Amino acid sequence: MQHAVNASDPEMALTALTALRRELEAFERVQAWKALDSGSSYGSVARSLGISRQAAHRRYRELAAATEPPPGAPEPTPKLRVSPEARAAVQLAGEEAKELGAVRMGSEHLLLGILRGGDGVGAAALRAEGVTLEAARLAVAPTLVGDEAPPNGGITAYARGVFHEALRAAAKEPRHVIGVADLLRAALRDQRGGACRTLAALSADVDAVAARLGNG
């Protein structure tokens, strides 16, 4: 906000405001999803936001779809749950892929989605190693996919592997809720994937980021 207020150039101020608006939208989405996930109704969320129930439903009805496994991922058992923050990171990753003109979502876009979602574990671990959303967008390194044809789900093989790994890890503990840290931890295990290659382009220590996430 300070960058927008203090900018002497109107265009710079508008750019800063646009970035701030995007981050506020991501924050609002996560908080709305958390409220709905904890049992709040669309009506109560709507009242908090000062909008109609219909508008809240239109804006956040993707919550139900976001609880489904990503295309190509194995079906989780009914006991496995995905946190609102993780669901938001995946959806934001899809938006980042689209905005960057990518035909498939890779783990590099998941990295951007995590940073944009700003959770207190995954995004915090990245920021602690000096990785910012703006820098990552500029340095994004597409996942190496070779001659692989675009899969039907619009997601790269490496990104599918991330979801497979996160679900497998969570399956070992039935009560575990799959979180952003699980997704990021899985993404960082593949040195060939876009997430690791993007961090390398930023001279960020992948092992240090992984260490901040703990063992899960």
Image (tube, rainbow, N blue to C red):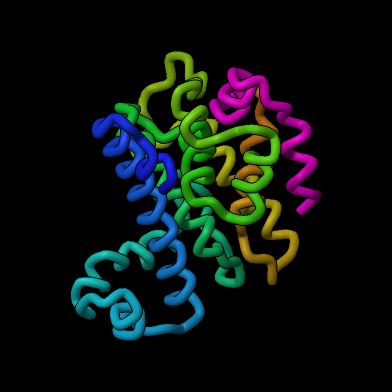
In the foreground, 72 or 187:
187
Residue 3 visible? The answer is: yes
**In the rendered view, would you say 203 is above or below 79?**
above
Horizontal relation, residue 134 to residue 181: left or right: left
Horizontal relation, residue 208 to residue 71: left or right: right
Residue in the image at 45% along x and 55% along y: 88
**In the rendered view, would you say 74 is above or below 156?**
below
Quarter of the image holding residue 203?
top right
- The residues colored magenta run 193-216
Residue in the image at 74% along x and 60% along y: 172
Dominant secondary structure (helix, strand or loop) of the stretch shown in magenta: helix
Residue 192 visible? The answer is: no
Residue in the image at 57% along x and 30% along y: 195
**The C terminus is located in which quarter?**
bottom right
Quarter of the image holding residue 171?
bottom right
In percent of width and height, residue 42 lies at 32, 80
Horizontal relation, residue 199 to residue 103: left or right: right
> Number of numbered discs present?
0
In percent of width and height, residue 98 lies at 31, 35
Quarter of the image holding residue 205?
top right
Residue farthest along the top direction in this orientation: 147
**In the rendered view, would you say 180 is above or below 146?**
below
In percent of width and height, residue 70 lies at 45, 50
Per the image, is 8 magenta?
A: no
Per the image, is 215 magenta?
A: yes
Horizontal relation, residue 61 to residue 166: left or right: left
Residue in the image at 51% along x and 31% along y: 108
In the foreground, 159 or 96:
96
